Structures are given as C-alpha cells and as structure tokens.
Amino acid sequence: MSAAAHSVVEPSVTSKRVAAALVVVYAVISMIPLFWIFATSFKTPPDSIAYPPKVLFTPSIEGYCNLFTTRTRQTPEYINSLPPATSFCDETTRKRNMVIAGPSNFLPRFVNSLVIAFGSTFCAVFLGTLAAYGFSRFKVPLADDLLFFILSTRMMPPIAVAIPIYLMYRELGLSDTALGMILLYTAVNVSLAVWLLKGFIDEIPREYEEAAMIDGYTRLQAFRKVVLPQATTGIAATAIFCLIFAWNEYAFASLLTSGTAQTAPPFIPTIIGEGGQDWPAVAAGTTVFLVPILVFTILLRKQLLRGITFGAVRK
C-alpha cells in the first residue's frame, strides 16, 4: 500500500487550480463594470441609452467632446451662418443644433482632485510615519489607549460629523478651499496611516538603528537612512490606501465644496446633456478620473504586493 506523501501546509495541485480559477472569475466579474464604463464613453448619446444595450457600436468621441466643452442651443439659421467647423467636436455639436460656448469646468475640478488627494495623502503618510515610529520605538504613556483612540476615529460614519465640520469650516473660512479639504482628508487618513505603518516599523529590528547610532548617526539620521528605506514597501501600500479614499471621497466634497475647490466626484454626476443626462460624457469623465489612481497603483504595484504580505512569513 503506497500513498503519495504531501505536506499538510502546502496546498495540493487541485486546490491551487481551483483557487486560481476562482480568482480569475472574480477578477473578470469585477472588471466588467469598468469595461462597460469605458465602452459607454465611446458611444453616442442614443447608443448609450439603447435597449437592449448595444455591445457592438460605432465608436465616437462625442462623450469626451461634451465632457471638456459647454454647449448652447442655437437656431439652424445662426449655425448655417457660422464658418465651417474646424474640429470633430465642433462638427458633432452643430449636427445637434448646438455650438461650443467654451471649455467646461471638468478640467479645473480634475486638477482640484489631484491637488487635494495627493496633498492629503502626503500629509497623512508623513505624519503617520512619524507617529508610528514614535509608538514603535519609544515608551509612550498609555500607548495602547492612544492607539485605540486614534483607531476609533475611523469607526463612525463620515455623515455623523459632517454637520459639525461644516459649521466649523464656515466659521474658520475653510469652506470651499483646497486647504480645508487637505486638512480634513489628512485627519481622516492619518489614523489608518499610523496603524498600518506601526506594524511595518515593528518588523524592522531595532538593532539596525542601534548599530547606526553606535557608528555616530543621530536618532534622526538613523531614522532617515536606516528605517525609512526598509519601510518603503509599507509607506507605498499606506499611500495607495490613503489616496484611494481621498480620491473617491464624495460626501464631504459635496457638502464642503461647491465651486473653487470642488473635486471631480461631485461634479461628474452634474454633467447634463441634450434632453437629460449625457451618459457618454459621464462615462468619459469617470474613465479620465480613473487614470491617475490606476497609474499610481501600477507604478507602486510591487511595493504594494510586498507591503500587504510584509511580516506574513517569518524565517
């Protein structure tokens, strides 16, 4: 009687294949909405609301034209009096008895999202790294209570504190300002940054810093030249999580901004086209809005994968 010996820890070939198949199926299902949004951005308004939905269609960039321009309706006589159209967007707009009046507000709102999201992410990760290092390396009185208090700020839904923050911002003059949104998102994200980064820094042996300080480094120099390089994966993973929240946040952006500092999430649903919602323009705005976070995640994907598995396997 012989039986193939196998490890109780190492998964079998069958279980690996089943797990891989489940991951692929889950990934495909998760990507379908994104592919559909991308496809809708290249449809015409009639095709975007056709029933049954059109899978095969003639691509058009009308949605992107409508996203980046504002249009006004004019009489056919006025449109015929204009010089020939000089671009596809102008030509398409005139076919619908409209003319381009100027650029839309999407680009300024998109820039606001970049400034606020990346600014708050930098501040949250910077403060979180310093706080996590302090909790990890020094004897902080009531450290466990303080860490729990920091974590408790993430337990309540944002809408619970929306009205007090709105009143406070109105008194301080921070409503509809990029600085106010950066401070708010930093305050929300810093708790997540502290907890994530403390776990990463705890995994870095203290002996490395002690050896550096014996060689003449100060505490700050040891932190900068020894700890930070080894915590890069954790910092990258934390930055991605913080950026995703700040980039996609909708409730506070809708309540606290309306013009100057408005970000893209509350602006995209307000895109109105001829006869109602311009779904190709909305889909185009969503597609453009996804690009920075996608690029940022792809650039840091190696650090992210190392970061989320850091400390999982010990030798």
Image: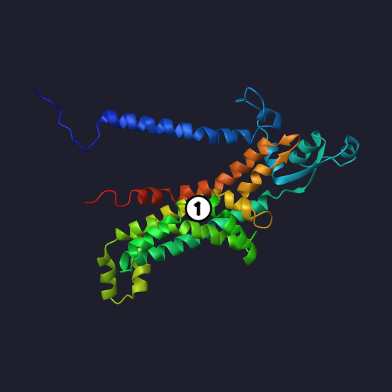
Q: In this view, does 276 lie above or below 117?
A: above
Quadrant of residue 176 in the image? bottom right
- Amino acid at pointer 1: Leu
Instruction: Tell me if 64 is positioned left or right of 250 in this view.
Output: right
Quadrant for the N terminus in the image: top left
Instruction: Tell me if 20 is positioned left or right of 269 in this view.
Output: left
Give the residue furthest to the bottom.
Answer: 216
How many discs mark residues in the rendered view? 1
Which residue is drawn at the image coordinates 27% and 65% (left, top)?
206
Instruction: Tell me if 269 is positioned left or right of 161 in this view.
Output: right
- The foreground one among 96 and 51 is 51
Which residue is drawn at the image coordinates 54% and 62% (left, top)?
183
Residue 111 horizontal/vertical position (percent): 62, 54
Which residue is drawn at the image coordinates 26% and 75% (left, top)?
214
The reply to whether residue 194 is visible in this rendering is: no
Task: Describe the element under mark 1 as helix, strand or loop.
Answer: helix
Residue 192 horizontal/vertical position (percent): 43, 55
Instruction: Tell me if 272 is positioned left or right of 135 in this view.
Output: right
The residue tagged 1 is 243
Q: What is the crowding at mark 1: few (fewer than 14 residues within 10 Å), some, or many (at least 20)?
A: many
Q: In this view, does 247 lie above or below 60?
A: below
